[in-house]
Image (cartoon, rainbow, N blue to C red):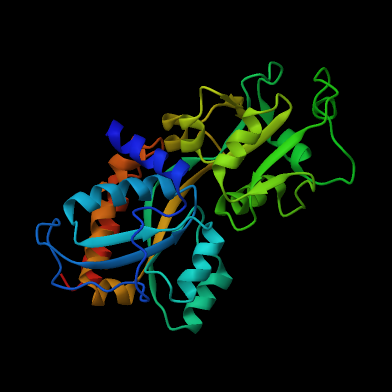
Amino acid sequence: MKSAKHLAMSTILGSAVFLAACGGDDESTGSGTPSEGSSEELSGQVRGDGSSTVAPIMEAIVEEYAAAQPGVQVSSGVSGTGGGFEKFIAGETSFSNASRPIKEEEAAGLEEQGVEYTEVELGFDGLSVVVSQENDFIDHLTVEELKEMWVETGEEKTWADIREGWPEEPIEYYSPGTDSGTYDYFNEVILEDEDIVRSATLSEDDNVLVQGVTGSPNAVGYFGYAYYIENQDTLKVVPIDNGEGPVEPTNETIESGEYAPLSRPMFTYVRNDMVAEDPAVADFIKFAIENAGDLSEAVGYVRAPQEIYDEDMATIEELAGE
């Protein structure tokens, strides 16, 4: 699966939408009958959007699916979890990638449109706090220090303000944008709904964050684990101490929950009516579930327990009338 990782991550660097299969006005226009294990050739278009954190997994799935079903064109934008749900609610997409669970107001928006949906779990991420390889003083951060660092206080903060003995140099901040599910998660578990520092550079493009942190020994940022893995030659991950000692994000600590509170599941949400009515959508989502575990690991994330994939598959097959 090494090639899948290369394809997935290189596509992110080159484009915000993959497979460039965005033609047409409808979110999906599949034809034919549902296939079993992608054995019957289908045609149509399937559109998605959403989280940049989930993008490496979904891009790898789409790349593999193109070989299995070349007649089905699948596209998926990366406008962030919130931006993806906006398009999902508006009926522009059949699936919506998310690095957090759907919010109550988003679910209400779908209900108002009469849209029922299914949550599909793709894998696990460990939100990674990173600094430049040139940063030679930071060895770990406590959850309390992380909050102190990132919450707006009205004053410029230096590293020395966070821990005695660190340099009296202003901290430079790089954060996912407010449409990002990664931002929402960080806000919930670290900021606890307090304002993020006003001086932070916010971007929905994780590669902008990578470049910003790489460029300064006084910078700090956070994003999905796969982006750290892809850039670990130029970035240094910061172990986080939640009171039980510093823990670095790894496949093992993310899967076990030891890397708390920054471990989280990743999802795609799919419209039930599209699964029931469009064989291309149903086939693609089944393919995604079948391959999510392997491809999560291929691009640097962690697979979910098999029973989760089995439960999701049973739901989708029932919706598809199988």
* Residue plotted at (31% across, 66% down): 46
Q: Say which of 41 and 150 sits in front.
A: 41
User: In which quadrant of the rendered view does residue 214 lie?
Assistant: top right
Q: In this image, 184 relative to 68: left or right? A: right
Looking at the rendering, which quadrant does residue 116 occupy? bottom left
Query: Where does the N terminus fall, quadrant-wise?
Result: top left
Q: Position of residue 268 (x, y in %)?
A: 40, 58
Placement of 105 over or under 62, stated as above or below: below
Of 192 and 132, the residue lying toward us? 132
Quadrant of the rendered image containing residue 320? bottom left
Identify the residue at image location x=68%, y=36%.
143
Give percent across and percent down for residue 98: 47, 56
Farthest residue, direction left? 40
Quadrant containing the C terminus is bottom left
Q: Residue at 33%, 54% (x, y): give it.
A: 19
User: Is residue 179 visible in this depiction of the protein?
Assistant: yes
Residue 249 in the image, given as x and y percentages of width and height: 51, 31
In the foreground, 187 or 307: 187
